[in-house]
Image (cartoon, grey):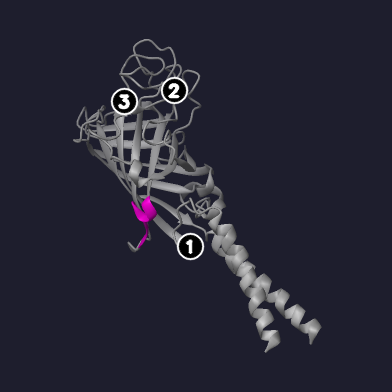
Amino acid sequence: MKTFKKVLMSTSVGLLLGLGTTQAHAFLFNIGGYSGAVDIKFDLYTAECATTPGNATPNSPCYGGNNSGGAAIGPSGGTLNETTYGVAHITDFETTSSNILWAAGQNGEQILAVVYGIADKSITSPDSGTTFNIENVGCTGGGFCDGKIHLDFYKIASTDYSGIGAGGITSADRLGFSTFGGVTNLASSELLGKLEFTSGARGTLPGVDLFQNTNSATLPASGSGNFLADCVSGPMCTGSGGAPNFNTNAEANASDFSGQFTLRQATNGGGWGGRSFDPLSTNALPEPSILSLFSGGLLGLGFGRRFAKRRG
């Protein structure tokens, strides 16, 4: 009986040590230890930059170089100015069979994302103006653009979220190239992960990071699009602090995320021109907090058994 008690105590200590590690990072969202395919559902609002080049102004919060006449288009058009940016609200993380793993508002949390650095590489119409193929890459103009399209995820408190559009986050709330009022500047804002779009949005055609097929070359427009992205930094990309790890290379071209979206006209004001809908597909690895909890228990059990053996 004494040996059993000692084993149980050692196991409990191991579990508590693992639990203590998890609680130290309890500020991050989790998806219950799930491992496998995940669809991230989002509601993305986008705005186009004004034709005036240069850095952000109150009426044109966009970034680029010094091309006269606005954003340059095409690989031979000099530096590529940013043409589009946006803010997304993440509604849920779910399995491919629609089982909800995390939903907006859970534990008093919301997840928002900012997308920025989008430039037009080319805009063509295969049918003389009825539809348009828009190929996007990262902007290169000015001192902010780095040739990449970025998508950054942030967790905020639900009490700090007032929606996107009139009365909430507007297109003019942009504070900098990667910062946005109501998303990145809050006391409750915590970075979850940074994604970068990767080449392959048009399949075998190289050098396209985002592809859109629309009924207009400018917003507002309707259509669809797709992109690939890699998880490059933050807890979502490393599994640290109890967050799920999405750095799995499980999507097309060994990317971490594959996005398919439907584009519609935004009608909620706030200066937004486009509204895009999910999903963003990825794969999750087990959360390390769960693994540490389990291994901590086994570690305690091992010590207990060795101790019992010596005492026996």
Q: Is residue 148 above or below residue 255?
A: above
Q: Does 200 sit left or right of 212 as displayed?
A: right
Earlier sequence position, callout 3 versus callout 1? 1
Earlier sequence position, callout 1 versus callout 2? 1
Q: Secondary structure at mark 2?
A: loop
Q: Are marks 1 and 2 in contact (CB under 8 Å)?
A: no
Q: Is residue 7 above or below residue 153?
A: below
Instruction: Check the picture and name the quadrant holding the N terminus.
Output: bottom right
Q: Secondary structure at mark 3?
A: helix
The answer to which quarter of the image holds residue 174 is top left
Front position in the image: 125 or 101: 101
The range drawn in magenta is 100-108
Numbered disc in front, either 3 or 1: 3
CA separation, marks 1 and 2?
A: 41 Å
CA separation, marks 3 and 2?
A: 29 Å
Earlier sequence position, callout 3 versus callout 2? 2
Dot 1 corresponds to which residue? 35
Front position in the image: 251 or 115: 115
**Residue 164, numbered circle:** none
Numbered disc in front, either 1 or 2: 1
In magenta segment, residue 101: yes
Which amino acid lies under the numbered mark 2 shown in the image of this protein?
Pro
| Residue 255 at x, y percent in the picture | 49, 47
Which amino acid lies under the numbered mark 3 shown in the image of this protein?
Ala
Farthest-out residue, top:
68
Dot 3 corresponds to which residue? 172
Front position in the image: 296 or 3: 3
Dot 2 corresponds to which residue? 75
Which amino acid lies under the numbered mark 1 shown in the image of this protein?
Ser
- Look at the image and tell me whether residue 153 can be seen: yes
| Residue 240 at x, y percent in the picture | 56, 51
Q: Does 311 sit left or right of 157 as displayed?
A: right
